[in-house]
Image (cartoon, rainbow, N blue to C red):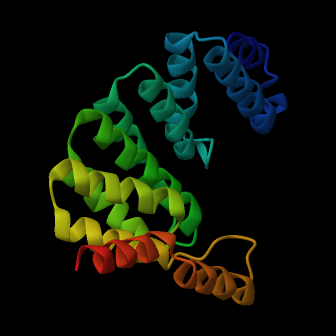
Amino acid sequence: RLLCKKREDNGLADQINIDLTYSVCFNLANQYHVCGMYTEALNTYTLIVKNKQYAQSGRLRVNMGNIYYEQKKYSAAIKMYRMALDQIPNTGREVRYKIMRNIGNAFVRLGQFQDAIASFEQIMEGSPDLQTGFNLVLCYYAAGEKERMKKGFSRLLSVRQIGMDDDALEADIEDVLQEDGLKDAMRERNKQSS
């Protein structure tokens, strides 16, 4: 800021490189974060976000939310994540779902399982993945919703694993269903008790 002010005072304002300034400020904030200097990182991120010359700076609210999350200030983290979510266009679905997962995790930390469930369910409707599915089942368990927990677990079984083709996945499912040692043991015990 001081350099920019000196340039303006000396009539050299046209030499200000917005991209370079953004990059320097972003790296400074990121290094503050890595070093655990959370207040300085938040102050630097706030300067970037409030500057209207930086078009995509609103996305940095995710970083701010992460800092609040690390500080266990979950309500502030949720607020930052939601503000970042407002900045992300609908075309950036994967980024939106990652932010929504962060929101759900923060709600879990606050013990607000119904809000976490709403966030995780929205992700599972749009882009289901194993991590979110497990989190959703755990939230159902914590909220004492047994039926929804069963449905969530069933849905979790239908989530496609990355890197597995359909044939390998079907073969794995068939192997699991055919080689059920627990069912065999239960049948054997039932026969013995009869």
Residue at the spot 64% in from the left edge and 22% down from the top edge: 29
Q: Is residue 121 left or right of residue 46?
A: left
Q: Position of residue 152 (x, y in %)?
A: 33, 70
Query: Residue at the location (52% across, 75% down)?
Result: 159
Q: Is residue 86 in view?
A: no
Question: Image quarter for residue 171?
Answer: bottom right
Relative vertical location of residue 191 with respect to residue 139 in this rendering, above or below:
below
Quarter in which the C terminus is drawn: bottom left
Is residue 16 shown left or right of residue 69?
right
Residue 179: give x, y in percent of width and height.
57, 78
x, y percent for residue 63: 55, 34
Q: Nearer the viewer, residue 179 or 133?
A: 179
User: Is 76 above or below relative to 146?
Assistant: above
Residue 40 against residue 22 in the figure, above or below = above
Task: Locate the N terminus by quadrant.
Answer: top right
- Locate residue 77 relative to residue 181 in the image: left or right: left
Examine the rendering and report whether any part of residue 95 can be seen.
Answer: yes
Numbered label tally: 0
Question: Picture coordinates of residue 71 (x, y %)?
Answer: 42, 19
In the rendered view, tell whether residue 87 sits above or below residue 64: below
Which residue lies most toward the left here?
144
Choose top left, top right, bottom left or bottom right for residue 94: bottom right
Question: In the image shown, does 180 or 157 lie closer to the viewer?
Answer: 180
Q: Residue at x 35, y 39 (%)?
A: 106
